[in-house]
Structures are given as structure tokens and as C-alpha cells.
């Protein structure tokens, strides 16, 4: 009887060990699947980071180009403004000369009309 109980005990322990091994194998399999998904997610994250980096690099390059264009337009605007001011000074000077000539002509006309 003692032998039968011992055999029964050994068989129960073996069954428990088998069940535990089964659970460990299933847990190991789930862990491996999780690691694969994690690796995939990590790869996708790196790809997204690379794409963002490329996009930011392109934006930075474009921003530099836009900055250069704005600077160039500003310089052109300043040059045009200088030409505009110079043109207006010339017009003002000619206007002043015309006004003086007209003033002289009017005075001359008055003096001539007054003497006649």
C-alpha cells in the first residue's frame, strides 16, 4: 500500500510538473510574441523618427531659403526706397525751380503791366 501511495504521489507530482511546464511554455511563447511586437513597434518608431528628422531637415533648409529670399527682398526694397527718395528730391528741386520761374514771370508781367 505504501508503494501504491508513493507511485500515486509521484504521478501527481509528475502531472503537476507537466502542467507547470505547459504553463511556462505558454508564458514563454507569449513573451516571445510580445518581444516581437515590441521590436516591430520600436522599428516603426525609429522609422517615424527618421521621417520626422528628414522632414525637419527639409523644413530647416526651406526656412533658410525663405530667410534668404526675405533678406534679398528687403535689400531690394531698401534700394528701391533710396531710388524713390532720390527721384522725389529731383522732382522737388525742379518744382522749386518752376515755382521760382513762375514767380519771376508773374512779377515781370505785373511790372510790365504796371508801367504801361
Image (cartoon, grey):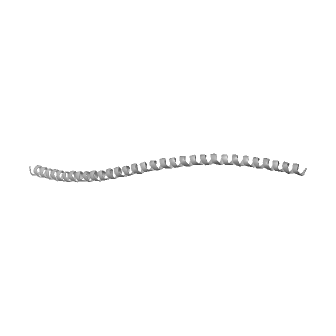
Which x, y percent locates residue 20?
75, 49
* Location of residue 67 in the rendering, given as x and y in whole percent from the top left corner: 37, 52
* Front position in the image: 113 or 48: 48
In the displayed structure image, the side of residue 41 where residue 90 appears, left or right: left
Q: Is residue 47 left or right of residue 6?
A: left
Q: How many marks?
A: 0
Q: Which residue is found at the position 65% from the left and 48% from the top?
A: 31
Q: Residue furthest left?
A: 116
User: Residue at 63% of width from left, 47% of height from top?
Assistant: 32
Which residue is more in the foreground, 66 or 88?
66
Where is residue 106 shown, x and y percent of the image?
A: 15, 50
Q: Residue furthest right?
A: 1
Nearest to the observer: residue 32 or residue 42: 32
* Of 53 and 76, the residue lying toward us: 53
The location of residue 1, given as percent across then percent down, is: 91, 50
Amino acid at each position: 500500500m505504501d508503494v501504491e501511495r508513493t507511485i500515486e504521489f509521484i504521478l501527481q507530482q509528475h502531472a503537476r510538473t507537466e502542467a507547470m511546464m505547459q504553463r511556462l511554455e505558454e508564458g514563454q511563447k507569449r513573451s516571445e510574441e510580445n518581444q516581437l511586437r515590441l521590436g516591430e513597434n520600436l522599428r516603426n518608431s525609429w522609422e517615424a523618427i527618421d521621417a520626422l528628422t528628414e522632414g525637419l531637415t527639409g523644413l530647416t533648409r526651406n526656412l533658410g531659403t525663405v530667410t534668404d529670399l526675405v533678406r534679398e527682398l528687403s535689400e531690394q526694397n531698401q534700394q528701391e526706397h533710396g531710388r524713390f527718395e532720390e527721384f522725389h528730391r529731383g522732382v522737388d528741386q525742379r518744382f522749386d525751380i518752376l515755382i521760382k520761374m513762375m514767380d519771376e514771370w508773374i512779377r515781370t508781367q505785373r511790372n510790365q503791366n504796371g508801367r504801361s
